Every structure is written in structure tokens, then in C-alpha cells.
Image: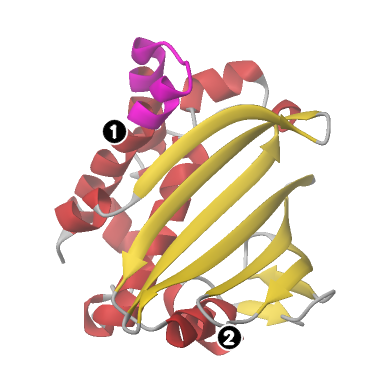
Amino acid sequence: MDIDSQVAGVQRAVSSTERDGIAVRVQSLAQRYPSPLDDVWDAVTSAERIGRWFLPVEGDLALGGRYQLQGNAGGTVLECEPPGTERAHFRVTWEFGGGVSWLTVRLHAEDADSTRLELEHVAPADSVPEELWNRFGPGATGLGWDAALLGLNLHLTAPDQRPDDPMAWQLGPEGKRFNRLAADRWALAHAADGADPEVARAAADAVYAVYVGEAPFEM
């Protein structure tokens, strides 16, 4: 698979700001997919299809419903606007490890055959201690979202290239290259948000080592 093009094709940003009077950290990713809006919407909202590129999911994937991803986050569907003309979006709570954050996915039809997906993950700043944030940076969650966008891209364009065992792939040469390149991009986004570039680089190295099994995750 074309790892370099996938990593380069994703836009990433980090923002430390306030929303509703609460200090938050916002991570954003965006990628263009060569598929119509209706197809991309179905891929990110159909339980059957989500399980083919991300994780198995159970629950009621409708406004007000509860969902649960296997071995990962669960939450409530807060907003759901299916495709009308050229846009669609959904917003859910992202509940994991006792913490609550918010995930929004927006779709924009660029033309009849391509769609831009924008993913925004908003978390209270105090949900991650400053020391832990400086140690691992935005890549701690960002690399997971990068893997999700890769999975979606393969699902839409080259399903035969999706690894049978994504975890084993992540620990192999191709997965390590993918995570290295993505971690480096998150370091740039971290620095652009005001982090010391050396701190951002060290955090990228640390989170890369965790993702590829070269170091344990320690609080």
C-alpha cells in the first residue's frame, strides 16, 4: 500500500482553546476520498461497514442512541444529519476509561465522485495531565485516528489491501513506517500549537515506540 501518499494526504491540526468556558484540546484530521458522499456516509454510519474498516460496533446508531465499539469507546449520538445536498455530519460522545470527550465527523461533497471527511476530537484539557501530554503529545490519540482514516481509505478504494491482522501489520515494517511518518506529522501540529519543537519531537518518538511495541505505555 502507498503509505507515503496516505500520510501526506491527511491534514492534521492541534488547537488548545476554550469551549463553553472549558479549556479543551482539539485534534482535527481531514482527508479526501474518491467516493460519492452517500457512499462515504454509509461507510461511517453503517454498523456492518464500520466493522469492516474500523472496529465492530453494537448499539443504536441513530440520534439519541447508545453505541459501543468493541474493546474501545462507547457513547451517545448527539447529532445526526444525513446527506441532504452536499453535506452531512454526526456528533457523538466518546467515552473511554472513565473520561468523556466529543467526536464530530463532517462530510462535504467536493463533486459527484469525491468527498472530504473532517474528523474533530475535542477533549477537556484536564482529562490528560500536562506531564502526560508533554510526554506523548497529540499522537497518543492521533495515531489511532490516522489508522482509522487509513482503514477507511482501503475500505473505499482497495479493500483487498486491508491486512487480515491489523495489529500484526502495525508491528511489522509497513506499519512501523506508517506510524513513524504519522507521528512526525503530529509533532509538527503539536509545535504549531505552541509546543517547544524539541518537546514535540520527543513526544512523537515516545508515542511511536508505544504504538509499534518497542516501549510500554506508562502513566
Taking the spot 63% from the left edge, 58% from the top edge, the residue there is 104
> Relative to 203, is 172 on the left or the right?
left
**SS class, disc 2:** loop
Is residue 45 something one can see in this rendering?
yes
- Answer above or below: position of 101 versus 149: above
- Answer above or below: position of 64 versus 167: below
Which secondary structure dominates the residues rendered in magenta?
helix
Tell me the quarter of the picture where residue 48 sits.
bottom right
According to the picture, the residue beneath numbered tag 2 turns out to be: 46
Structural distance between the alpha carbons of marks 2 and 1: 32 Å
Please say whether residue 213 is one of the residues in the magenta stretch. Answer: no
Residue 70's x, y, as percent?
62, 70
Mark 1 Cα-neighbour bin, 10 Å: few <14, some 14–19, many ≥20: some
Please say whether residue 189 is one of the residues in the magenta stretch. Answer: yes
Taking the spot 59% from the left edge, 80% from the top edge, the residue there is 45
Query: Where does the magenta region start and end?
Result: 188-201
Residue 204's x, y, as percent?
36, 28
- Could you tell me the amino acid type at mark 2? Ser
Taking the spot 31% from the left edge, 36% from the top edge, the residue there is 185
Q: Residue furthest front?
A: 85
According to the picture, the residue beneath numbered tag 1 turns out to be: 184
